[in-house]
Image (cartoon, rainbow, N blue to C red):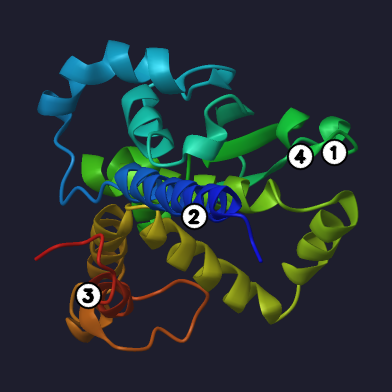
């Protein structure tokens, strides 16, 4: 027969485990803060606080420091991770990847790059960060940081496989999974505003381009993003 004191200790152990699980769930829920719209004139007052909390080991992009910090605030895993934001004429609107010289280090000790293009000619200049609204800028930077969070769980060989993926059809699923991850971290509205802005500017005479259900490409349409937001409890109303 089991000693009554042992039974009590067992009950207390299970109670402690249950409390830890509840607290852990609450902490995770608190980390997800879905804001409908970031307004620059309001958020600038929080710059010093954001820099202190989320600016460790970060080389922020000149001219987009606040946007980058707001996006970083949604990714607690990246607080102490080394990230360099680079603004250059590179021919690709935005991209992100581990810095190759650091690739053989452990995931959290690598340096990650987020590269922002500074010059595009023609109508595609809508893809330049400098031509987008503030809230949309936070959203697309958040998309690139969603890649960075993903790389934290990838080995050298996994990242090499991801690089090969970019040259095949699997890139579609790769980018869409990135948007789903971003939404789960509370940046869905920002990504929605980005998708809506870009599609309306690229096809101003086709309203369907802004609200169509299927985009047929690697990046989600505004309506697809909305459907995921509607099914996420972190996005009230």
User: Circle 2 sits in a helix, a strand or a loop, which is it?
Assistant: helix
Comparing labels 2 and 1, the label whose residue is closer to the camera: 2
Q: Is residue 41 above or below residue 125?
A: above
- Label 4 near label 3: C-beta < 8 Å? no
Q: Quadrant of residue 77?
A: top right
What is the residue that sits farthest to the front in this orientation? 1
Residue at 27 percent across and 63 percent down: it is: 192
Which circle's residue, 2 or 1, is located before the other in the chain? 2
- Tell me: residue 17, above or below residue 69: below
Whole-angstrom CA distance, mark 2 to mark 3, is 40 Å
Q: Give the camera-side residue of 54 and 145.
A: 54
The residue at the point 69 percent across, 50 percent down is 151
Residue 103: give its label.
1
- Spatial CA span between label 3 and label 4: 33 Å
Which badge, 3 or 4, comes first in the chain's sequence? 4
Q: Position of residue 186 (x, y in %)?
A: 32, 53
Q: Which residue is mark 4?
A: 107
| Mark linked to residue 11 | 2
Gap between marks 2 and 1 measured at Cα? 47 Å
Rendered location of residue 71, percent (x, y): 38, 39
Instruction: Quote the CA–CA distance across marks 4 and 2.
Output: 39 Å
Q: Position of residue 201 (x, y in %)?
A: 25, 64
What residue would you read off at disc 3? 230
Comparing labels 1 and 3, the label whose residue is closer to the camera: 3
- Position of 21 compared to 199: left or right? right
Say which element carries label 1.
loop
């Amino acid at each position: 027969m089991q000693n009554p004191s042992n039974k009590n200790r067992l009950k207390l152990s299970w109670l402690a485990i249950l409390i830890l699980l509840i607290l852990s769930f609450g902490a995770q829920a608190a980390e997800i803060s879905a804001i409908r719209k970031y307004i620059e004139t309001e958020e600038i007052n929080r710059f010093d606080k954001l820099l202190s909390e989320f600016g460790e080991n970060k080389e922020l992009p000149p001219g987009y420091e606040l946007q980058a910090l707001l996006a970083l605030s949604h990714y607690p895993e990246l607080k102490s991770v080394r990230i360099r934001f680079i603004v250059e004429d590179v021919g690709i609107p935005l991209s992100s990847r581990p810095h190759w010289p650091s690739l053989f280090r452990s995931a959290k000790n690598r340096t990650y790059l987020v590269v922002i293009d500074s010059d595009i000619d023609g109508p595609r200049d809508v893809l330049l960060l400098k031509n987008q609204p503030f809230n949309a800028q936070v959203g697309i930077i958040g998309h690139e940081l969603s890649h960075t969070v993903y790389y934290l769980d990838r080995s050298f060989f996994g990242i090499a496989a991801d690089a090969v993926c970019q040259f095949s059809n699997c890139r579609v699923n790769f980018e869409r999974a990135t948007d789903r991850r971003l939404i789960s971290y509370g940046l869905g509205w920002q990504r929605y505003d980005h998708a809506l802005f870009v599609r309306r500017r690229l096809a101003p005479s086709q309203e369907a381009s802004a609200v169509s259900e299927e985009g047929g490409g690697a990046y989600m349409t505004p309506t697809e993003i909305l459907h995921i937001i509607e099914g996420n409890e972190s996005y009230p109303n």
